[in-house]
Every structure is written in structure tokens, then in C-alpha cells.
Image (cartoon, helix red, strand yellow):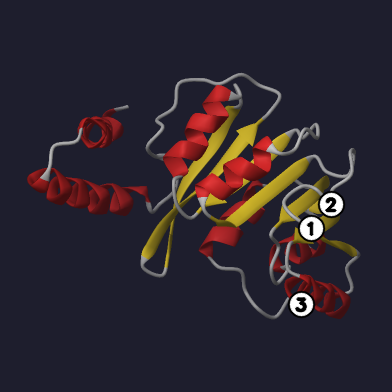
Amino acid sequence: MRKKLGARLETVLSLIDGGVRLCDVGTDHGMLPVAALLTEQAKSAVATDISGKSLKKAAILAEKEGVPLVCREGDGLAPLKEGEADVVVIAGMGGQEIIRILKESDLPISRFILVPHTHASEVRKYLKERNYLITHDVAVKERDHFYFVIEADCTAPWQEHSLYFGREGKDFTEYRAARLEKIDRLLSVKQDPSLEEEKEELLNADRA
């Protein structure tokens, strides 16, 4: 594939174990599922998007790369049929939208890989409520922004995990310093118990 994946999607690709049935929700350009098929991380892949224009781009890329990507227009997981995916990726949208998509589907999925652009803590809280195990939570810096790539095992129970952040990845140390600086600025204006709690967890993260 000529165009390289960004840091976020490279991290997602690294978490897709070889030979799975993949669904990429909100696929946009389709680069992730096409890359997964090319590298044999996925043996099959369904790309969904609410935008027909985005799906057309994905279909063109798949045809150019010679991979059998199935493209379906629709909202969230609605276009996916039972048994078509073991692993579902939802990236490129806010955490509240990710939670909505998860709530509206009752398909039996083994694993989710989620990349919330906002409200990552709410996504972790939702996974805790569903009793899903967070197996990876990787801090990723892309351009000037930090993101978390969160993998959840739906077949294993929740274990203790910070709702504020994940400590994996080479970018976590830089994220931690930047976030602590921002928290201190916010707390200098107004006290906030949740920010105090997050600060305490971040300060102790390197000791855990």
C-alpha cells in the first residue's frame, strides 16, 4: 500500500491478531482494513460507514490493492451480520459516539479495538459496566495530539484499570507530563475532585 498508516492506525493494526474476521466501523478511506488484509492480519474484512462517498473511496482502494474488502453503507454496526466479525475496530470518532454504537448492537463480538478522539474515560467506564477486560490501552501521539488505543476482550471479566488513562506505549511519559501540566492549570482556577483524582493516579503511575 503506497500511503502509510498514521501512528494511531499502525497501533490498531498491531493489535489485530493474524487471521481474524475484521469489521472496521466508520472506515472512511478504508486504509486500515485494506492494510489488515494485505498483511494477513485479517482473513476477511467488512468496512462500514454512514457515508457512501467514504465507502466508495474504500472500495476503490481495495480494488487497487487487490483485496476482497466488503463495503456496506450504514450506521455503526447495523450493516454487520452475525458471525462476520471476531474483532471490531471503531476509530476516528468521539467516545460518546463509540458508546452509542456499542449500546445499539447486540452482536456477539469477541474483541473491540476502540480509538476515542474524546471522552476516553467514559469509554473505559462503559467497558467496566459491561464487565469487559481491557487488555491493551496504548497512549499514541500523532501530530500534536494524544490518543488512546483501547483493546477490550468481551469474553473476559474486568480487572482493575485506571478510567483516566492507559500506561502502555512509548508516548505515555510525554502524555503524562502534558496532562499533569494541564490539570495543574485547571486546578489553579477551580477545584475539581475528579481532576484531583486523575492527578493522583498520574503521579503514581510510574510506581505501579
Give above or below for 149 relative to 103. Answer: below
Q: Position of residue 145 (x, y in %)?
A: 38, 63
Q: Residues within 10 Å of mark 3 (few under 14, many from 20)?
A: some
Nearer to us in this view, 139 or 41: 139
Callout 2: 10 Å neighbours few (<14), some, many (20+)? some
Label 2: state its secondary structure: loop
Q: What's under tag 3, amino acid-wise?
A: Lys
For residue 188, the mark is none
Q: Which mark sits nearer the N-terminus, 3 or 2? A: 3
- Res. 150 image quadrant: top right
- The residue that disc 1 covers is 74
Label 1 close to label 2 by CB (< 8 Å): yes
Pointer 1 or 2: first along the chain: 1
- 96 or 109, which lies in front? 96
Q: Secondary structure at mark 1?
A: loop
Q: Residue at x 57, y 49 (%)?
A: 97
Residue 168 visible in rendering: no
Instruction: Using the image, determine if residue 114 lies above or below residue 73.
Output: above
Disc 3 from disc 1: Cα separation: 15 Å
Residue 10 placed where, x, y %? 59, 60
Q: Name the amino acid, label 2.
A: Pro
Q: Quadrant of the N terminus?
A: bottom right
The answer to whether any part of residue 208 appears in the image is yes
Q: Is residue 49 above or below residue 183?
A: below
Read off the residue under disc 2: 79
Discs 3/1, front: 1
Q: Residue at x 36, y 48 (%)?
A: 172
Residue 80 in the figure: left or right of residue 12: right
x and y percent of residue 183 in the render? 20, 46
Residue occupied by mark 3? 57
C-alpha span from label 1 to label 2: 6 Å
CA–CA distance in space, label 3 to label 2? 18 Å
